[in-house]
Image (cartoon, rainbow, N blue to C red):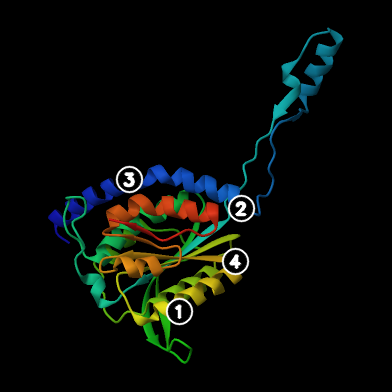
């Protein structure tokens, strides 16, 4: 990776974070309010102990108020949420996307790698566990005829490590496209997340006949307490993107990064949403 490329990446990352982070607190609030396992949650005041009781006793004796007699307790509900991210690693992911905010052109995979480097540490900071990986499509004896082989980027016990970013950015994509396999793999990955709220997110740049399985997979995910979301980038046309469960499509990673956290917040709040195409 040359110096010019590194400099372009820094600019791309800066542009992404400035657009993305304003939605992070909104997502965190939605996750907390939607959490069914809030843990301890106190608001108000309780009688203080120790020296505060002594001060209260002395105040009563001298017939005066003592504001020291109470202590304020406020424990916010914890975030118990996780997102799996199953990413298409077919050969077309090495094709170029539209220019990244005037900063330069990157392949579809490079767009996603830049996006991951921005969004994964942000999710770490608000307590969301992630399980992300590239998914290769291999043969299997099931209804679809395929299964996903996962190359892990993060797992539920491991936070994003920035030093892995440059290696990921330089990966070469190859293979075919089978969107239902990405969706199924995202669901299977989400099942491994040790959290209350689970989102299974698959990312693709393509179109294939397996779209007919997505509605069944969405329902299977819901039965397991998992919300399935499809993310499109690159060649995905409007009709394909609109068929993704709770889908979102954007022309490149910068536009996608600007709207993805907001889209996730809406899904968390409403349960399911209509597909969104962002030009």
Please name the residue shown 78% across and 27% down the image: 50
For label 2, the residue is 35
Q: Earlier in the sequence, mark 3 or mark 4?
A: 3
Q: The C terminus lies in which quarter of the figure? A: bottom left
**Distance CA(mark 3)–CA(mark 4):** 30 Å
Mark identifier at residue 213: 1
Q: Earlier in the sequence, mark 1 or mark 3?
A: 3
Q: For residue 172, say whether it is visible.
A: no
Q: Quadrant of residue 92?
A: bottom left
Please name the residue shown 29% across and 53% down the image: 255
Q: Quadrant of residue 207?
A: bottom left
**Distance CA(mark 1)–CA(mark 4):** 19 Å
Q: Nearer the viewer, mark 1 or mark 2?
A: 1
- Above or below for 50 versus 31: above
Q: Earlier in the sequence, mark 1 or mark 4?
A: 1
x then y, percent, for residue 99: 18, 56
For label 4, the residue is 225
Q: Would you say the residues marked 1 and 2 are in contact, meaning their CB atoms lie under 8 Å apart?
A: no
For the residue labelled by badge 3, is the local secondary structure a helix, a strand or a loop?
helix
Q: Would you say the residues marked 3 and 4 are in contact, meaning their CB atoms lie under 8 Å apart?
A: no
Q: Nearer the viewer, mark 1 or mark 3?
A: 1
- Above or below for 264 versus 169: above
For the residue labelled by badge 1, is the local secondary structure a helix, a strand or a loop?
helix
For label 3, the residue is 19
**Distance CA(mark 4)–CA(mark 2):** 13 Å
Q: In the figure, is residue 75 to the left or right of 163?
A: right
x then y, percent, for residue 218: 51, 71
Q: Earlier in the sequence, mark 1 or mark 2?
A: 2
């Amino acid at each position: 990776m040359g110096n010019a490329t590194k400099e372009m990446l820094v600019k791309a990352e800066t542009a992404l974070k400035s657009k993305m982070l304003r939605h992070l607190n909104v997502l965190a609030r939605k996750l907390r309010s939607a959490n069914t396992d809030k843990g301890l949650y106190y608001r108000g005041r309780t009688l203080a102990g120790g020296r505060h009781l002594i001060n209260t006793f002395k105040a009563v004796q001298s017939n005066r108020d003592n504001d020291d007699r109470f202590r304020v307790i406020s424990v916010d509900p914890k975030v118990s949420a996780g997102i799996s991210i199953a990413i298409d690693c077919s050969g077309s992911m090495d094709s170029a996307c539209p220019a990244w905010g005037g900063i330069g052109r990157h392949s579809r995979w490079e767009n996603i790698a830049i996006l991951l480097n921005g969004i994964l540490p942000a999710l770490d900071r608000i307590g969301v566990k992630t399980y992300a990986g590239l998914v290769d499509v291999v043969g299997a004896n099931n209804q679809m005829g395929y299964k996903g082989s996962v190359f892990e980027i993060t797992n539920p016990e491991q936070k994003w490590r920035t030093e892995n970013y440059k290696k990921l950015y330089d990966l070469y994509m190859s293979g075919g496209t089978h969107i239902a396999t990405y969706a199924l793999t995202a669901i299977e990955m989400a099942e491994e997340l040790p959290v209350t709220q689970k989102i299974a997110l698959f990312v693709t740049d393509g179109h294939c006949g397996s779209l007919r399985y997505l509605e069944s997979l969405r329902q299977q995910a819901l039965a397991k307490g998992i919300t399935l979301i499809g993310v499109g980038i690159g060649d995905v046309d409007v009709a394909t993107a609109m068929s993704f469960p709770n889908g979102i499509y954007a022309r490149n990673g910068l536009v996608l990064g600007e709207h993805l956290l907001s889209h996730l917040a809406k899904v968390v709040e409403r349960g399911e949403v209509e597909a969104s195409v962002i030009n």
